[in-house]
Amino acid sequence: MAKIIVVTSGKGGVGKTTTSAAISSGIAMRGHKTAVIDFDIGLRNLDIIMNCERRVVYDFVNVINGEANLRQALIKDKRAENLYILPASQTRDKDALSVEGVERVLKELADDGFEYIICDSPAGIEHGAFMAMYFADMAIVVANPEVSSVRDSDRILGILQSKSRRAEQGERVEECLLLTRYNPERVEKGEMLGVKDVEEILATKLLGVIPESETVLKASNQGIPVIHDKESPAGQAYSDAVARILGEEVEHRFMSVEQKGLFQRLFRRSA
Amino acid sequence: MSIFDYFRNGKKDTASIAKERLQIIVAHERNQRSQPDYLPKLQQELLDVIRKYVDVDQDQVEVQLDNNGNCSVLELNIVLPDR
């Protein structure tokens, strides 16, 4: 049985695609056969984040419509051995995805031996976002420590609890929170919501905290998922999150301000 | 902490304001979410019927559904205008 994980948020620009790229790469690097599907029909972007934008021939909608088979559409990642990408279509027909079509593709992937299927949801709560979350076993709700993002995350949690297939069957999607663009210094100054605050408001289990980091933009510039950058705090935080998804107990990091050297402290005081 | 932090004394930090605002709106929205989908339409139709007889405003009608175990109570609160 493949585990289906949706990466969702409601609000746009919080790091869903960055997270989908990092998490799917991380799971694949740990030896699991993984597929990552871009559900953002019309605004395909996972391909450019993962540096395979020039290798797209067929897409998700082509497979659903029977114009191509899955093997033709899946793009093998060049960095992680067990990773395959199914790009979104650039069609303007938003309703190109159907429940039956999506279910068929997911089943075909599972039958093909895929252990993890990551669904990169579009922003919003419309059809594409609904399709991405409907079959999920687990949901990673990506949020920034900022009012609009936290509010939208709560909306998404409500939809997962009422509209997903698991909810319809009286079960529950395993929900978890991933807080991205976290800045412990600003939290300490009282300028940013802390991780405990967001956990308390959303009452959802914490998967991880990704610190705000320059390396995230540098990684997307090059099309290398940030998890490959072992030096970067953001990359390390994603690796920790992947370990937790795989059932390991890993202590949370990057939640507080690092102890600075005396020189840096003096410099900050005078600033 | 820098010395500038002393100037903030007495004022709440903005993160606490954010948390408070979020707790209120999230609680409100969760409450609405647990209500059945037909409630707004029911409210509208009830209002239309009442308006046939009395002149009431949109915001003078309150419909609320409370669940107490296996029994649900539909509460209807209508403020009639002064004569």
Image (cartoon, grey):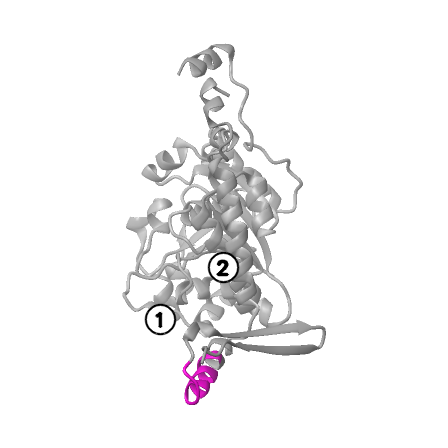
**Residue marked by disc 2:** A155
- Location of residue A124 with respect to A66 vertically, above or below: above
Report how many numbered discs are placed on residues in the image: 2
Q: Say whether marks 2 and 1 touch (CB < 8 Å).
A: no
In this rendering, does residue B1 appear at all?
yes
Is the residue A44 above or below the residue B49 in the image?
above
In the rendered image, residues at marks 2 and 1 fall on the same chain: yes
Q: Residues within 10 Å of mark 1 (few under 14, many from 20)?
A: few
Q: Where does the N terminus of chain A fall, quadrant-wise? A: bottom right
Q: Provide the chain ID for the residue under circle 1.
A: A
Disc number placed over residue A225 in the picture, else none: none
Whether the magenta-drawn stretch holds residue A142 is answered as: no
- Identity of the amino acid at label 2? Arg
Ranked by sequence position, the earlier of labels 2 and 1 is: 1
Separation of marks 2 and 1 at Cα, in angstroms: 22 Å
The image quarter containing residue A129 is bottom left
Main SS, magenta region, reads helix
Image quadrant containing the C terminus of chain A: top left
Look at mark 1 in the image and give the residue it sits on.
Answer: A95
Q: Nearer the viewer, residue A119 or A179?
A: A179
- Say which chain tag 2 marks: A
Q: Nearer the viewer, residue A108 or B17?
A: B17
SS at circle 1 = helix
Chain part drawn in magenta: B43-55
Q: Is residue A238 visible from the viewing direction of this image?
A: no
A68, A165: nearer the viewer: A165
> Picture coordinates of residue A34 (x, y %)?
51, 52
Q: Nearer the viewer, residue A183 or B64?
A: B64
